Image (tube, helix red, strand yellow):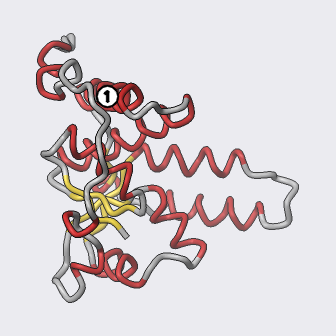
Amino acid sequence: MSLTIDLRSHLRRIKSEKTIRQFSRRPEDELVAAADLAGEGRAAIMADTNVYIRSAAGTLPAAAEALVERGLLFHCTVCVAELSTGVANADPEHSGWKTLRDHYAGLIASIPATRLLTPDPEIWVEAGLIAGTLARIQNYQRHQRKEALNDALIFLTAAKAGLPVLTSNRDEFDLIQQLAPGGRFIHF
């Protein structure tokens, strides 16, 4: 079976060619915050990489922690890659490296296969269009383009599964959502 990707249809959907003006970040009260969901029942969510990192550091805000603890948590292979990159990039001669390694190795090993989502080829194309469009209109630097691609991959993977992304990256996910309004995110 061969895969054919129709770039033109993805361009029509993302409207990259028509997006020429820089986006403004929307006011916080127009977005969904973790604190807005306090007291609600169990929700299915996908965690962004910063959720794992802040949880490990003990700096995850209470509202976000409550969503993680009572929610049905899904994971993205892009986040696993970002966490793995962080472990490999850390100094193995540092006294805390083995603890860091063991924490993330255990965390990644504990992810159920049924809750691990992977971007498909269509998501990769649209994430590339989103990252490229944002890089152009927001004047991103080279390192920001790669971050935008990873964030778009996470956002679109969650959107395809019908899940919101829990993230501390409010500004970045706001811009992505403006290009892909079918997805959702919860910020903290």
**What is the quadrant of the C terminus in the image?**
bottom left
**What is the quadrant of the N terminus in the image?**
top left
In the rendered structure, the answer to whether residue 77 lies left or right of residue 175 reads right
Residue 30 locus on image (x, y percent): 19, 64
Name the residue located 48 percent from the left edge and 60 percent from the top edge. 50
- Residue situated in front as seen by the camera: 19 or 127: 19
In the rendered structure, the answer to whether residue 98 lies left or right of residue 149 reads right
Above/below status of 23 relative to 166: above
Q: Is residue 1 visible?
A: no
Q: Is residue 108 visible?
A: yes
Above/below status of 42 relative to 86: below
Q: How many marks?
A: 1
The residue tagged with tag 1: helix, strand or loop?
helix
> Which residue position is annotated with label 1?
124
Residue 128 locus on image (x, y percent): 34, 26
- Residue situated in front as seen by the camera: 132 or 84: 132
Name the residue located 19 percent from the left edge and 78 percent from the top edge. 42
Residue 82 locus on image (x, y percent): 53, 46
Residue type at mark 1? Trp
Name the residue located 22 percent from the left edge and 64 percent from the top edge. 31
Q: Residues within 10 Å of mark 1 (few under 14, many from 20)?
A: some
Q: Residue 131 is drawn in which quadrant?
A: top left
Name the residue located 33 percent from the left edge and 40 percent from the top edge. 152
Q: Residue 33 is drawn in which quadrant?
A: bottom left
- Residue situated in front as seen by the camera: 78 or 13: 13
Residue 140 locus on image (x, y percent): 48, 33
Farthest residue, direction bottom: 39
